[in-house]
Image (spheres, rainbow, N blue to C red):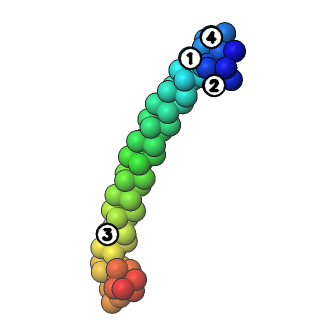
Amino acid sequence: MDSREPDPAAEPLRDAAENLFQELQEHFQALTATLNLRMEEMGNRIDDLQKNVNDLMVQAGIENPIKEQMT
């Protein structure tokens, strides 16, 4: 048998490995999408928190809100 020809007995194993790889890739893509969404949500929450802190500082009469201090 030529060493470059695929072994017919290895075909089920190759198919199983390809299926497993496809499943892992799908799970990884779903996890990546979930993480990106959660990071975006966290960024929005941080922005809201910063705005609320700035508003409170203005109400308290503090002259330099956080946003000005960060720039």
Of badges 3 and 4, the one in the foreground is 4
Q: Earlier in the sequence, mark 4 or mark 1?
A: 4
Task: Point out residue 42 in the picture as x, y percentages from the top left corner.
Answer: 41, 55
Q: Residue at x 44, y 37 (%)?
A: 29
Q: Amino acid at mark 2?
A: Arg
Q: Quadrant of residue 17?
A: top right
| Mark carried by residue 8 | 4
Q: Amino acid at mark 1?
A: Asp
4 and 1 marks in contact (CB < 8 Å)? no
Estimate how packed mark 3 is, as few (under 14), some (14 to 19) or many (20 or more) residues with alpha carbons within 10 Å: some
2 and 3 marks in contact (CB < 8 Å)? no
Q: Quadrant of residue 49?
A: bottom left
Task: Point out residue 68 in the picture as x, y percentages from the top left corner.
Answer: 34, 85
**Camera-nearest residue between 22 and 43:** 22
* Residue carrying label 1: 15
* Residue carrying label 3: 51
